Image (tube, rainbow, N blue to C red):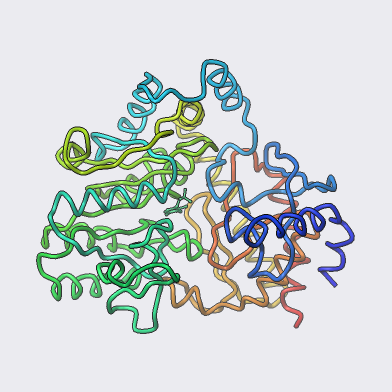
Amino acid sequence: MQTQTTLSKTPRSTEAFARAGQLMPGGVSSPVRAYKSVGRDPIFVQSGSGAYVKDLDGNEYIDYVLSYGPLILGHCPSTVVTAITKAAGKGSSFGMPTTAESNLAEQVINALPAMERVRFVNSGTEATMSAIRLARGATGRANIIKCTGCYHGHSDGLLVEVGSGATTLGVPSSPGVPEAITQHTLLVPFNDLEAVRSMLKANPDTVAAVVVEPIAGNMGTIPPLPGYLQGLRDLCDEYGALLLFDEVMTGFRVAYGCAQSLYGIEPDLTCLGKVIGGGLPCAAYGGRAKWMNQVAPSGPVYQAGTLSGNPLAMAAGIAMLNELQDGSAYEQLEAMASRLATGLELAASEAGVAIQIGRVGSMLTCFFRDKPVTNYDDASDCDTNALARFFGSMLDQGIVLPPSQYETWFLSTAHDEACIDKTIAAAKVAMQQASNQ
Ligand SMILES: *Cc1c(COP(=O)(O)O)cnc(C)c1O
């Protein structure tokens, strides 16, 4: 029934998806966009403005995807658009240094006490891949410890999911990734310090880095348990491993000082992406000068990029951070996200649907589960059929959510009270749908 409604409202998206399917694998440039896990066709976007996107048929939706995180000011914030336009008129790429790189670098370094040097790259995948190369190069150790359910981009060594015997050696989660690479990725459950301790004990002097999303965002939003991040810091110090915070999602999203400022932890290396590019392809990794000076050309650890530090991306990032710097955006985001969470909980309880809200600031996931969610196993034990019904009903009512239980919803500063209340009203209907078999 839901599908029919949508099909009748979105014939141009259906047509566009059929065409794209003949040209690109699954018709998309990134898998989650195909809506496979919610069993329907994606909408094709024509344009975005503020909190809204418009599809090819002219339907408008309140957008909680927000390009999977970067658009913290919503679509087309005027300062960012102006900055990009101005930069584009002066040349889109040079392969020679510009002061824009130093300007954004300075802003990032000023925001993060643990970051003394930074290197810009083009995607979060590149940032984590390069930071791990650096950790290995700097420590002379091959192994990394990674949490099941944490996503750090799609480079070979990080593309390791769960097996059921999750605390053993990494098994590749995609064909094309040799075990010779993933055997160096040691898996532990998120929020489980004892597992990290045993892993370090069992692999003495071979672990280059413990890699973690300080707030998990790629198995839905799961905050760290109290003491977890400090425990990781202590264990890394004890065993001589570097602590690498992958803040590609959380960086400048949960606070101007990123997640590390919220929890008061200084990692050795930090990866950034999403928000720092202001919606353009840009990411970064950085940390103490002692480590970063190992990166070429200061040091021997090689890493490069034709479009890295791209002037358009730098301009967008600088404009974005300028808007965020005074911190007022985060207060507003917190107020709106908290209002949304309360509304969702009420809608669910009225409909008799069990949910758990995972939330830190403007990152939020509605898990369809009756017990707390603290790790990947919990997140994998949700009623995804209920989620699919909820998602479909929301879409039909003009609210677009990330199409999976493992994704985070994002708010922007353009999501005002009216948007939130419209979303809550839609959720009341959608929760009823979710409760029907
Ligand atoms: C999105 C994300 C990445 C990958 O970034 P891309 O720009 O998609 O390559 C890495 N780590 C985390 C935590 C992310 O959320």
In depth, the one of 427 and 72 nearer the eye is 72
| 61 left or right, relative to 134 | right
| 181 left or right, relative to 368 | left
| 410 left or right, relative to 249 | right
The x, y position of residue 116, in whole percent, is: 23, 34
Query: In the rendered view, would you say 346 is above or below 47?
Result: below
Query: In the rendered view, would you say 75 is above or below 159?
Result: above
In depth, the one of 344 and 373 nearer the eye is 373
Asked which quadrant contains residue 396, the reply is: bottom right
Residue at horizontal 53 percent and vertical 43 percent from the top: 70
Q: Quadrant of the C terminus?
A: bottom right
| 345 left or right, relative to 287 | right
Residue at horizontal 71 percent and vertical 60 percent from the top: 21
Residue at horizontal 62 percent and vertical 75 percent from the top: 384
The tally of labels here is 0
The x, y position of residue 172, in whole percent, is: 38, 72
